[in-house]
Image (cartoon, coloured by chain):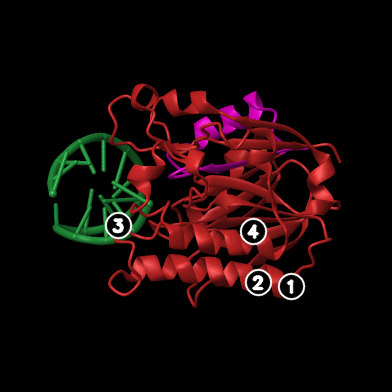
Amino acid sequence: MRIATWNINSVRLRAPLLLDIMAEANLDVICLQETKTPDEHFPLDAIKSAGYPHIHFNGMKSYNGVAIISRVAFTDESIYERVGKQDCRHISVKFPEFELHNIYIPAGGDEPDRDINEKFAHKLDFVDEMTGFFESNHSSDSPLMVVGDFNIAPQEHDVWSHKQLLKIVSHTPIEVEKLSNMQASLDWVDASRHFVPEDEKCYSWWSYRNRDWRKSNRGRRLDHIWVTQALKPALSKHDILLDVRDREKPSDHVPVIIELNL
DNA sequence: ATGGTAGGCGCCCTA
């Protein structure tokens, strides 16, 4: 089973690119973030016609929005309210072999201080709430996967310059600590780092504000796929589709893919 | 220290 996560930054604008990627990468499932559209404008028919009839999604006007698109059937579609907001950042479904959660953690604004920046406070509270959610609703020995745009690059080599990003939201010690607590709670395996050594640079996002993203290569690994120990033996392949960043009108994120041998 | 670009929406917000 081939599963991808991708912050698409507008599913309406990039629906044709989405269909290309699903076909080219032979995906069974793709989880999207930042679909940026109310449900009535989601491009359902085009995606269904492309061979992906199973779609669970939750969107709103302008901001956020998540979707799980699959060619194999799932059950138990859920939508969650997070940090007291219904802002379309967390959905889940169940496949026969495992449960899949798709999350879009708040970006957190520019100032890494929860007392003066409520967006940063929201981000930290969101991660804490996810930790509590998995702890109280799930056991570490059950087969689970959580994917999405976590908006946090936890490790030194998940950013282009550890030193220069220590005070930049996405790589601050408090965010890394919160995410580390979440990872420890169910003993999650970071699937990308299962395949890519920790001393090797690994990115999934490059700012739109760099003239030449490949040349400057000031990337960050913000997009993640985690599995519980029960699924670890099934991890069989990993890929980050760097070339998607060079497509016409690209998202600033590229798809991260994991293959499970179930 | 600063500003750079993109998408959605409507003249500004979020990333």
Which residue type does callout 4 highlight? Gln
Quadrant for the N terminus of chain A, please: top right
1 and 2 marks in contact (CB < 8 Å) = yes
Which residue type does callout 1 highlight? Asn
Which residue type does callout 3 highlight? Asp
Is residue A77 one of those drawn in magenta? no
- How far apart marks 4 and 2 lie (CA) works out to 12 Å
Highlighted magenta segment, given as a residue range: A1-28
Q: Which residue is mark 1?
A: A137
Q: Examine the rendered structure and indicate whether residue A211 appears above or below residue A2.
A: above
Mark toward the viewer: 3 or 4? 4
Q: Which residue is mark 2?
A: A133
Chain A representation colour: red
Name the side, left or right, on which A210 lies relative to A230: left
Q: Which residue is mark 3?
A: A110
Mark toward the viewer: 3 or 1? 3
Which residue type does callout 2 highlight? Phe
Q: Chain of mark 3?
A: A
The image quarter in which residue A246 lies? top left
Q: Who is closer to the viewer here, A203 or A180?
A: A180
* Same subunit, tags 3 and 4: yes
Q: What is the x, y in percent for residue A8?
A: 48, 42
Name the side, left or right, on which A122 lies relative to A50: left
- How far apart marks 1 and 2 lie (CA) works out to 6 Å
Q: Examine the rendered structure and indicate whether residue A132 appears above or below residue A260.
A: below
Quadrant for the C terminus of chain A, please: top right
- How far apart marks 3 and 1 lie (CA) works out to 33 Å
Q: Which residue is mark 4?
A: A183
Q: What is the x, y in percent for residue A216?
A: 34, 26
- How far apart marks 4 and 1 lie (CA) works out to 15 Å
Q: What is the x, y in percent for residue A225?
A: 64, 46
